[in-house]
């Protein structure tokens, strides 16, 4: 396990309090500069290696038996983390997720048991239409998180994550270092069409049942 201070730019206590206040208040929080640039670059390089090795698969929608390909809904390719076999880069992201999970459990009593997640690559011209992350047949997903790995992204590149909040739409550019957390059953969101290859990690903190 890696020290949190060597992974994120915010002091651990600050990270935890902003996370907890965001989820307890509006139900989401955006950290514009969370991951250290060298960690974001390491993860980006790993994603490119995995892509070149053919490790990404077209993503589906729905859980278990009801999972199916749905190119009209989402066009990304995904590469799932294997919790028992995380790479060094993945363990660094994992340290941030664990700190978040502990903070949310300690202060919000969410009973988050574990997390699951995948890298995602959206080729140019793809998107992920409006959806909630909680499945109809499985209510364990409670808090969602997304990290972005796109250096030098401009607004002309598209690909914003658009969250539907009580205060209206909130668009977040998928710029390296930025991370978002939100309540899985409360915040509908979508990935707007991207014009450049777009790299992200999507993860979900789950209750036990
Ligand atoms: C998802 C999702 C957003 C992103 O995979 O459920 O909403 O920016 N991803 O990758
Ligand atoms: Mn989602």
Image (cartoon, rainbow, N blue to C red):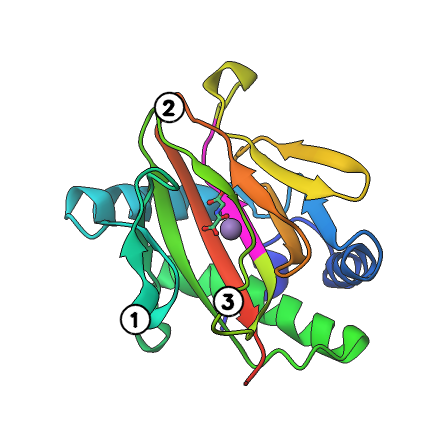
Quarter containing the C terminus: bottom right
Residue situated in front as seen by the camera: 75 or 180: 75
Q: Residue beneath label 1, please?
A: 65
Q: Is residue 41 above or below residue 108?
A: above
- Contact between labelled residues 2 and 3, with CB atoms less than 8 Å apart: no
Residue at image point 56% right, 73% down: 139
Residue bearing mark 3: 136
Residue 107 screen position, x and y as percent: 80, 75
Between disc 1 and disc 2, the foreground one is: 1
Query: What secondary structure is found at the residue carrying circle 2?
Result: loop
Residue at the (60%, 36%) spot, across then down: 162
Q: Is residue 177 visible?
A: no
Bounds of the magenta span? 145-151
Residue mark closest to the camera, 3 vs 2: 3
Report how many numbered discs are placed on residues in the image: 3
Q: Which residue is identified by label 2?
A: 196
Marks 3 and 1, how far apart in space? 12 Å
- Direction from residue 197 to residue 57 in the image, left or right: left
**Label 1 SS:** helix
């Amino acid at each position: 396990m890696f020290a949190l201070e060597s992974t994120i730019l915010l002091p651990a206590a600050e990270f935890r309090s902003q996370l907890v206040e965001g989820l307890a208040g509006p139900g989401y929080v955006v950290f514009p500069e969370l991951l250290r640039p060298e960690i974001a670059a390491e993860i980006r390089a790993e994603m490119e290696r995995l892509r070149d090795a053919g490790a990404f698969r077209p993503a589906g929608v729905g859980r278990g038996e009801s999972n199916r390909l749905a190119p009209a809904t989402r066009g990304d390719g995904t590469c799932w983390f294997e919790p028992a076999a995380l790479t060094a880069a993945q363990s660094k992201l994992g340290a941030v997720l664990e700190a978040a999970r502990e903070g949310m459990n300690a202060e919000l009593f969410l009973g988050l048991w574990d997390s699951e997640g995948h890298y995602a690559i959206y080729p140019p011209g793809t998107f992920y239409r409006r959806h909630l992350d909680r499945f109809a047949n499985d209510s364990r997903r409670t808090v969602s998180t997304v990290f972005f790995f796109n250096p030098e992204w401009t607004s002309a590149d598209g690909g914003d994550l658009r969250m539907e909040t009580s205060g209206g739409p909130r668009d977040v550019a998928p710029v390296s270092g930025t991370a978002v957390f939100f309540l899985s059953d409360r915040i509908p969101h979508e990935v707007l069409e991207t014009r450049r290859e777009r790299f992200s990690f999507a993860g979900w903190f789950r209750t036990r049942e």
